[in-house]
Image: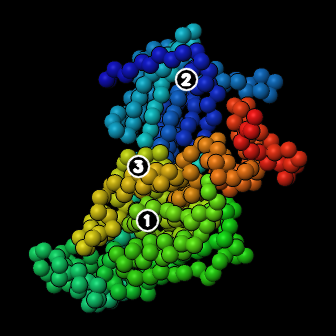
Amino acid sequence: MVAIEVVQITGRERDRLLVLEEGHFCDLKSAEIAPRKLAKTVSALANSSGGDLYIGIAEEEFFGVKTRFWDGFKDQEAANGHLQSLEQLFPLGAEYSYEFIASPGSKGLLLHLAIQKTPDIVRAHDKRVFVRRGAQNIEIKGAAAIERLRLDKGVESYERRSVDADIDVVSESDTLAGFVRQVVPASTPLKFLRKQGLVRSGKPVVCAVLLFADEPQAILPKRSGVKLYRYKTSNAHGTRDSLASDPVSIEGPIYQLIKSAVAKTVEMVEGIMKLGPSGLEPVRYPEVTLHEIVTNALLHRDYSFAADVQIRIFDNRIEVESPGLLPGHITIRNILNEQFARNGSLVRLINKFPDPPNKDIGEGLNTAFREMEKLRLKPPIFNETGSSVVVSIRHDPLASPEQSVMDYLANHDFITNRITRELTGIGSENIVKEVFYRLHEAGLIERVPGRKGAAAAWRKTTG
């Protein structure tokens, strides 16, 4: 067996490790655990978002209080049974790494497994499949559940499924006719569809409908359009009462859908005003950022979900919600550095259109982040729900709260807690108070005399 690195850590690092919270990305096990039981945890982490598994941390209970302690393997050879069992299923490589951890004064060696989210389904020794839900390993049972996991991980792609529709809705569409005229070498519409594997048993596949049907939404209802909402609020959730108007439905083949969704979003954002250092200022979001995130949402979504992409415009942010979980080995942590195309044919073929929306494949999200930074705005935030990915593009400045306060006071006589929260996006009154106190201690601001309670205000130091 290949020698495994032994990493030395300090006593302080050991103490931090012993109090790690077990959860979705982390599990701690005793060295006494049977090797085959460990495979369940590795399967669960690899089939979810990846994580860390530490073996050699025991637990004892005394008067109802559980305490962890370091109780590692005597030496590397003592862990051979565990390593041999695990490496049969999870060999060392890009998706799994093994190391031993030692700490002065602590008994034995800990075995640490760093597990990445894998592009394929990972099974335990008994061929069962597990996923991680919080701190639990949950077995996935039944063909339907396994199929759902395959789609979630991108092992199979819904884009290759045939649609119960006449091939003519694609082969005789104006969209495909215009497209094949600029394809090299030239081809007839039906020949092109067959050559690209977009026809199965005489029926168009989902990818063909999305790209080339003139009205994909008539064939793939509730899973091929965009819903656009404008909420006149900065609250965490929009409500019917805060809707500025009826939701807007955007439809059409996906190439045009992306352009229309971005254009309509920009149009809706125009006219929104936000408090800035000089007073009310028009809200500006980089159009490139909107384009890249909407493109990503439509090209990489899971089309097996009967739900449209949603774009929600709030007073202080834009949210783009894409149905389905992140595919393959992609996680929130590595989304800017790794690539995995759930809908490989869709991504490849739309790139053949003139001025394609995905010009720099693999660089779109990084471009979105750079454009936000150019406007001195905080980067987009990615969040994975149980069945979708939500990207929040906030209109929060990169400047520190202290700098925002001083910039505002350069143009105004005073500032209040409420104004500061609007400026910075901070939701807590107490956090804003701490900002004021730090600036006061630095001698930069002072209280405005005679203003107390809710009317309390601060101004630049006059002394």
Please give the residue where the numbered disc 2 appears in the rendered image. Answer: 56
Give percent across and percent down for residue 7: 44, 19
Gap in angstroms between the C-alphas marked 2 and 3:
34 Å
Question: What residue do we see at 57% from left, 66% from top?
Answer: 282
Question: What residue do we see at 34% from left, 54% from top?
Answer: 363
User: Is disc 3 placed on a helix, strand or loop?
Assistant: loop
User: Is disc 1 placed on a helix, strand or loop?
Assistant: helix
Instruction: Give the answer, above or below, for where 248 lies relative to 275.
Output: below
Q: What amino acid does circle 1 point to?
A: Glu
Q: What amino acid does circle 2 point to?
A: Gly
* Residue 153 seen: no
Question: What residue do we see at 53% from left, 27% from top?
Answer: 55
User: Is disc 2 placed on a helix, strand or loop?
Assistant: loop
Please give the residue where the numbered disc 1 appears in the rendered image. Answer: 287
Give percent across and percent down for residue 454: 85, 52
Gap in angstroms between the C-alphas marked 1 and 2:
51 Å
Q: Is the residue marked by circle 1 packed among few (<14), some (14-19), or many (20+) residues within 10 Å?
A: some
